[in-house]
Amino acid sequence: MTKYTFMVCPHDTIHNPERWYELERYFIARLGTEVLFEMAIDFLDFQENVPKADIVYTNPSDRISILKAHGYVPVARPMNTYDEVVLVASTEVANPSINSLQGAEIATVTSLIPTHLSFDLLHRQGIKAGALHHKESWQAVISSVWNHEVEFGFVYKDTYDHLSDHGKSLINMFYVSDERKAFHTLEISPRLADRKSEIEQLLLGMDADAAGQTLLQTLDIEKWLPVTDEEMGIMEQLMSIELT
């Protein structure tokens, strides 16, 4: 029997990774094919091994920088679920605002799309940031701000939302984006090109059966939508923004 491997962005396996095994079982039952969910231990592991996977749920940055180059095809995206950014400041900064970022040093993960979203916001308001301090994770960005190593940080909203109340109290969140331009996608390898329509219909129809509805709730996905070329083009434009 043919076996497909399935990988998921580490952003989405930090909390409740078991839910992705449930999607694995859903694929097996509906596709009549063995599907093996392989969980990446971190982003380096994900980025090194994702080109070998057949089905991938990926963040937009890795989609554009890795999967597109290997010919992966976007099949579907979650409805009303977008990658957004939170702007945070040290508690020592009085009354922070977007204007405070003019010439400011900022901690962020420079390779990921929330940083590009942030620069798009700043560019539209005529604000030019100062030096960027690259960190290996969003948690490291948060730590650098609450330890007062830098005054400001760009943080992936999902990471901020999962902070404890105590963690949130150690930094000052002063802006949350609502750009609705970037999102995770479920992609398939070119090896599965002949099953694209089948997999797309499987995902788009999940909300139509009881088991699919339960799984969508577990995944915290309202429903799946098809991905348009226009939407993918907007994300690629975001990733092309120079961080200066």
Image (tube, grey):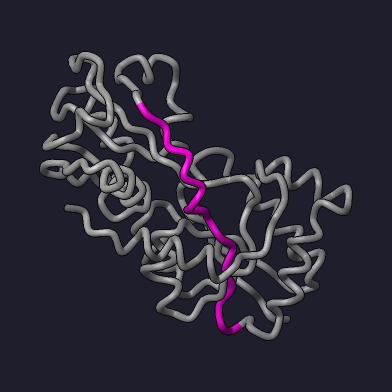
Decide: is 197 above or below 157. below
The mark tally for this picture is 0
Nearest the viewer among 105 and 68 is 105
In which quarter of the view is residue 197 placed?
bottom right
Asked if residue 206 lies left or right of residue 163, the reply is right
Instruction: Work out whether residue 6 or residue 188 is closer to the camera in this orientation and state it.
Output: 188
Asked if residue 46 is positioned above or below residue 131 in the image, the reply reads below
Q: x%, y% of residue 92?
A: 18, 14
Residue at image location 60% in from the left, 60% down from the top: 37
Is the residue 71 above or below the residue 46 in the image? Answer: below
Left or right: 69 in relation to 3: left
The relative height of residue 133 versus residue 51 in the rendered view (above or below) is above
**For residue 53, side relative to residue 76 (left or right):** left
The location of residue 182, given as percent across then percent down, is 48, 53
Quarter in which the N terminus is drawn: bottom right
186 and 17: which is toward the camera: 186
Residue 152 placement (x, y as % from top left): 22, 30
Give the magenta-colored segment's residue range.
175-191
- Is 61 in the magenta? no
Could you tell me which residue is drawn at 48 percent across and 52 percent down?
181
Apparent side of residue 73 relative to residue 134 in the rendered image (left or right): right
- Residue at image position (22%, 30%) is 99
